[in-house]
Image (cartoon, rainbow, N blue to C red):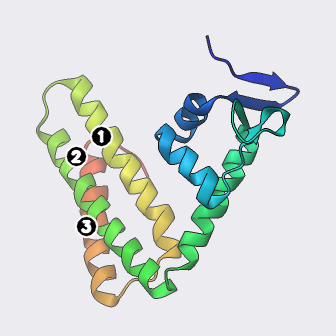
């Protein structure tokens, strides 16, 4: 049974283990983040030791703020290069799944592979709008996407 409390819509986590589990971190990391990075932890009765609580909303806001500050460190050009690399790798993975689906005889496995390839295709199409590609990157990605779309269509997918 979880020690999570709900007051109205405010979800409260109690104890280091529950807070660490929610953040998917170790207890020591969470304790260090409280000390060094102002992780929003509240102590009962204002004591410096003892029981701790945190709200999911405050933890989520803290994580979001930390991510934004980290992303600001990267110049836009570097972010586009990382994005372009992601798109290329994702397209190659999607082509691998569609190729496996073309050869698969077990319908259940075939369906899962088609679904993975299609999800990757849809993700690439959404993300590429926001990423600046060089001419060479665009040419390669377009060729991969055309091949992927063709393979998916031959597997019964509609666009």
Q: Is residue 9 left or right of residue 156?
A: right
Q: Residue at x 71, y 39 (%)?
A: 56
The picture places residue 40, in percent across and down from the top left corner, at 72, 49
Name the residue nearer the viewer: 129 or 82.
82
The picture places residue 23, in percent across and down from the top left corner, at 55, 41
> In this view, which residue lies farthest toward the top?
1
Q: Residue at x 62, y 68 (%)?
A: 68
Q: How far is mark 1 from mark 2, CA to CA? A: 7 Å
Q: Is residue 32 left or right of residue 105?
A: right
Name the residue nearer the viewer: 133 or 51.
51
Image quadrant where residue 149 sits? bottom left
The N terminus - image quarter: top right
Disc marking residue 133: none
Name the residue nearer the viewer: 123 or 34.
34
Q: How far is mark 3 from mark 1, CA to CA? A: 16 Å
* Residue behind mark 1: 114
Which of the marked residues, 3 or 1, is nearer the chain's N terminus? 1
Asked if marks 3 and 1 touch (Cβ < 8 Å), the reply is no
Crowd tier of the residue under label 3, counting other residues whose Cα lies within 10 Å: few below 14, some 14–19, many 20 or above = some
* Residue behind mark 3: 144
Crowd tier of the residue under label 1, counting other residues whose Cα lies within 10 Å: few below 14, some 14–19, many 20 or above = many
The picture places residue 124, in percent across and down from the top left corner, at 41, 62
* Residue behind mark 2: 97
The picture places residue 91, in percent across and down from the top left corner, at 29, 61
Q: Is residue 86 left or right of residue 62?
A: left
Q: Secondary structure at mark 3?
A: helix
Question: Considering only vertical position in the picture, is 105 above or below 65?
Answer: above
How many callouts does the rendering have?
A: 3
Q: How far is mark 3 from mark 2, CA to CA? A: 13 Å
């Amino acid at each position: 049974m979880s020690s999570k409390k709900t007051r109205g819509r405010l979800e409260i986590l109690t104890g280091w283990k529950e807070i660490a589990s929610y953040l998917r971190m170790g207890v020591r990391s969470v304790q260090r983040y409280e000390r060094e990075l102002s992780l929003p932890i509240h102590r009962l009765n204002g004591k410096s030791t003892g029981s701790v609580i945190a709200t999911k909303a405050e933890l989520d806001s803290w994580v979001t703020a930390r991510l934004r500050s980290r992303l600001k460190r990267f110049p836009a050009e570097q972010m586009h290069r990382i994005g372009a690399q992601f798109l290329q790798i994702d397209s190659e993975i999607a082509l691998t799944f569609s190729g496996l689906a073309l050869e698969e005889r077990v319908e259940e496995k075939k369906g899962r592979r088609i679904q993975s390839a299609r999800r990757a295709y849809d993700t690439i199409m959404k993300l590429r709008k926001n990423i600046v590609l060089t001419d060479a990157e665009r040419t390669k990605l377009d060729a991969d996407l055309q091949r992927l779309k063709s393979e998916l269509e031959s597997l019964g997918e509609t666009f």
